[in-house]
Image (tube, helix red, strand yellow):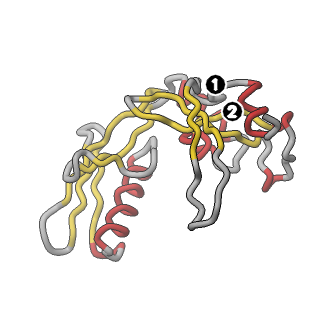
Amino acid sequence: MTSLRYQTFKKSLVCKCCGIEGTIMLLELPSNGGKVCVPHFNLYAEREGGLVQMTKDHIKPKSKGGKDHISNMQTMCARCNELKGNKPGKLKRLREIQDGVQTIYTVVYGGIDDQVLDGFATSDRGLAEIARKWIMETYMWYEDTFEVQVSIRLKAIRVIPDNGEPIKFAIKPIRRV
């Protein structure tokens, strides 16, 4: 096990941000457009009845001059890694979220067996963007043809089209930070 990813997991199985621990290794065959692929192991943690993939994260992002070296790697779950992006200082803010400073939310659409939309946010504006993006991709509506109303207090989002019935979403708190 000489890969940098496995070496990172050897250092720690715990997400540097949220503290979730990877406990399940699965042998997987990646899909690569019909090309022959080599099976490899992926590390997963259990969260809310599902699996979250654990990843290696560059402490100093490559886009900011960080190196592919074990000293520049840390373990993070895929969700935290996505939230951090290529902003090294953002990890401090994400930790504050994890420490109970504020709540992080996701958006749920109840029309399709409580489908959780892709993305997390801590504000009305961020939640509106998640709903707006989903509406535009799903219904192919232009941004100026509907209005998004968010109420964290009511844990609800309403998308009001120029014509037709409003579409309702629920706001689900993920973690108090």
Rendering coords of residue 106 (x, y %): 38, 43
Residue type of the residue flagged with mark 2: Thr
Residue neighbourhood size for the residue with mark 1, other residues' Cα within 10 Å, grouped as few (<14), some (14–19), many (≥20):
some
Tell me which residue sits at (22%, 47%) in the image. 113
Residue 3: image quadrant is: top right
Q: Give the vertical position of 28 relative to 51 (above or below).
A: below
Q: Mark 2 points at which residue?
A: 75
Rendering coords of residue 9 (x, y %): 71, 30
Q: Give the vertical position of 44 relative to 137 (above or below).
A: above
**Residue found farthest to the left:** 165
- Between 34 and 156, the one nearer to me in the picture: 34
Q: Name the residue under label 1.
A: 14
Closer to the chain start, of discs 1 and 2, is 1
Tell me which residue sits at (34%, 76%) in the image. 142
How far apart in space, not on screen, are marks 1 and 2 (Cα)?
6 Å
Give the mark count. Answer: 2
**Residue found farthest to the front:** 36
* Residue 84 horizontal side relative to residue 125, left or right: right
Tell me which residue sits at (20%, 74%) in the image. 162
Rendered image: mark on residue 3: none
| Disc 1 and disc 2 in contact, CB within 8 angstroms | yes
* Residue 108 horizontal side relative to residue 79, left or right: left
- Between 32 and 158, the one nearer to me in the picture: 32
Residue type of the residue flagged with mark 1: Val
- Between 152 and 33, the one nearer to me in the picture: 33
Q: Is mark 2 on a helix, strand or loop?
A: strand
Rendering coords of residue 5 (x, y %): 74, 39
